[in-house]
Image (tube, grey):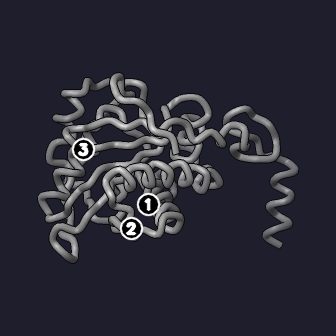
């Protein structure tokens, strides 16, 4: 019965690629296949690897998944994130690290039908064999960061997170998030984790905005 309903929905509302709008797939192979260069840069001394630049079909896919609830994009986006985790893991020798997602505030998660990063993290955990720990907790509501400068974003995020301690002090952790812009959120998350006793080895994201694109380091490919 459920399969018949889905078939009927697809007939009335055919699935189209978020990138090129070709029918048959939420994100076609041509649009999602190139994993892109692995952009490596530093945020407050924290190594950050993104699977690609926040533009084109990758941007469209993230927006559709995050803001419009297109969960079919979760698996391919998690594949991109897994590639960034793998590159970071090889770089720091930490593929056995715990993955700690930047989770949404409860009100935001309710509006979006669930925590989009926690869902991605769990898929990445299966793909990479890493465990996922929801160690971070927001402490208060930050203002909307849209339009803020890098310094203003850092001030906006300061003291906004706390973390629970690991089972063993010094346990290695890799932060994961969807997009890195100025890095203020990742820097605050790393601070909270380290204060709680974690050893933060770096961060992996699905995408990085152009302003975070490195100018001196060469991109690494898978």
- Percent of width and height locating residue 145: 31, 33
Q: How many marks?
A: 3
Element type at mark 1 = helix
Of the residues under marks 2 and 1, which one precedes in the sequence? 1
Say if mark 1 contacts mark 3, CB within 8 Å: no
**Left or right: residue 193 compared with residue 93:** left
Say if mark 2 contacts mark 1, CB within 8 Å: yes
Element type at mark 3 = strand
Say if mark 2 contacts mark 3, CB within 8 Å: no
Disc 2 designates what residue?
Answer: 132
**Left or right: residue 98 compared with residue 83:** left
Q: Which mark is residue 62?
A: none
Disc 1 designates what residue?
Answer: 118
Residue 29 appears in the rendering: yes
Q: Residue at x 81, y 54 (%)?
A: 9
Outermost left residue: 195
Q: Residue at x 66, y 42 (%)?
A: 33
Relative vertical location of residue 195 with respect to residue 23 in this rendering, above or below: below
Q: CA distance from mark 2 to mark 3?
A: 20 Å
Residue 212 appears in the rendering: no
Give the label, 1 or 3, closer to the camera. 3
Element type at mark 2 = loop
Q: CA distance from mark 1 to mark 3?
A: 21 Å
Q: Give the quadrant of residue 58.
A: top right
**Placement of the N terminus among the 4 image quadrants:** bottom right
Q: Residue at x 55, y 37 (%)?
A: 36
Q: Which mark is residue 46?
A: 3
**Left or right: residue 21 compared with residue 191:** right
Q: CA distance from mark 2 to mark 1?
A: 9 Å
- Percent of width and height locating residue 137: 26, 59
């Amino acid at each position: 019965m459920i399969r018949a309903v889905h078939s009927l929905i697809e007939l009335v509302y055919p699935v189209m690629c978020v990138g090129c709008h070709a029918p048959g797939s939420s994100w076609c192979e041509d649009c999602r296949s190139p994993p892109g260069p692995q952009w490596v840069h530093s945020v407050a001394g924290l190594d950050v690897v993104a699977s690609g630049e926040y533009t084109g079909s990758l941007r469209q896919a993230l927006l559709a998944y995050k803001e419009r609830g297109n969960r079919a994009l979760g698996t391919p986006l998690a594949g991109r994130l897994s590639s960034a985790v793998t590159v970071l893991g090889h770089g720091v020798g930490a593929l056995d690290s715990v993955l700690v997602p930047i989770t949404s505030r409860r009100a935001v998660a309710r509006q979006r039908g669930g925590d989009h990063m926690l869902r991605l993290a769990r898929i990445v955990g299966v793909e990479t064999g890493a465990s996922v720990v929801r160690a971070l907790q927001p402490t208060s509501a930050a203002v909307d960061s849209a339009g803020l400068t890098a310094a203003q974003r850092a001030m906006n995020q300061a003291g906004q997170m706390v973390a629970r301690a690991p089972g063993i002090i010094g346990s290695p952790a890799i932060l994961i998030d969807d997009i890195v812009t100025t890095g203020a959120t990742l820097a605050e998350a790393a601070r909270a984790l380290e204060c709680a006793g974690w050893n933060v080895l770096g961060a992996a994201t699905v995408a990085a905005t152009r302003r975070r694109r490195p100018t001196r380091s060469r991109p690494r490919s898978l």
